[in-house]
Image (cartoon, rainbow, N blue to C red):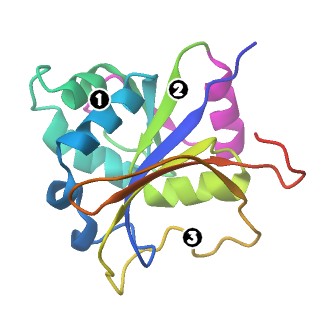
Amino acid sequence: MRVRKLVAGLFITLDGIVDSPANSPKKWSNAEMAERIAAGVAQADTVLLGPRTYRLLAQFWQHQSDDIPMACFLNRSRKYVVSHTPDNLEWQPATLIQGNLAEEVAKLKEQPGKNIQIPGSPRLVRSLLRLGMLDELNLNICPVVAGTGLRLFDDLDSPLPLQLVDARTYTNGVLGVSYRLVRLTGGTK
């Protein structure tokens, strides 16, 4: 049985900040990046989100037309929202995940389907990295130092070996990199 891949995509500054206006997708996105993101989205049929990212994406994307590929993907894909508190999931189809994160994500990965995409949700991505459950990490590294904000790799208590899968430089100076997480024994997950 094929296990689905869990793939995260984030905009990040040179100093590792993932929640700053300095690295906003609105500021840095261009046609080249949109093509690459669309290619990744085409390989997914499910979205995993933290509650804050769910609310932010819902505010914008649920009001967009299916003529926009990202809107079509996000609006039609099943969304799973990881939260410890009940949340109003008005942007459907959506399911709340409140149990043990590792167990619930493992069940989700075993279901039939394409990749599971995590757009944003840096705290959730950090938790999945810590658990060793993330399969691929796609970073758009913006050519800016934010100085303060939420850092993606803070609080990791062990090394995180990564294997470079792809790297490209966009005309706006953003470096797009894709990494596969590697087991400490040397094989890939």
Name the amino acid, label 2.
Asn
Looking at this view, is 43 or 6 the one in front? 43
Q: Tell me if 34 is positioned left or right of 127 in this view.
A: left
Corner quadrant of residue 101: top right
List the residue tagged with mark 3.
Answer: 153
Residue at left 21%, top 70%? 21
Q: Quadrant of the N terminus?
A: top right
Secondary element at image label 3: loop
Name the amino acid, label 1.
Leu
Which is in the foreground here, disc 1 or disc 2? 2
Image mark for residue 74: 1
Q: Is residue 100 visible?
A: no
The first of marks 1 and 3 along the sequence is: 1
Number of other residues with Cα within 10 Å of mark 3, as a class: few under 14, some 14 to 19, many 20 or more: some
Residue 20 point in image, percent of width and height: 28, 72
Image mark for residue 165: none
The vertical placement of 92 against 20, above or below, is above
Residue 105 point in image, percent of width and height: 63, 36
Q: Which residues fall within the magenta stretch?
A: 89-111
Residue at left 62%, top 24%? 4
List the residue tagged with mark 2.
Answer: 115
The first of marks 1 and 2 along the sequence is: 1
Name the amino acid, label 3.
Phe
Q: Tell me if 66 is positioned left or right of 174 in this view.
A: left
Residue 108 on the magenta segment: yes
Corner quadrant of residue 25: bottom left
C-alpha span from label 1 to label 3: 26 Å
Number of other residues with Cα within 10 Å of mark 1, as a class: few under 14, some 14 to 19, many 20 or more: many
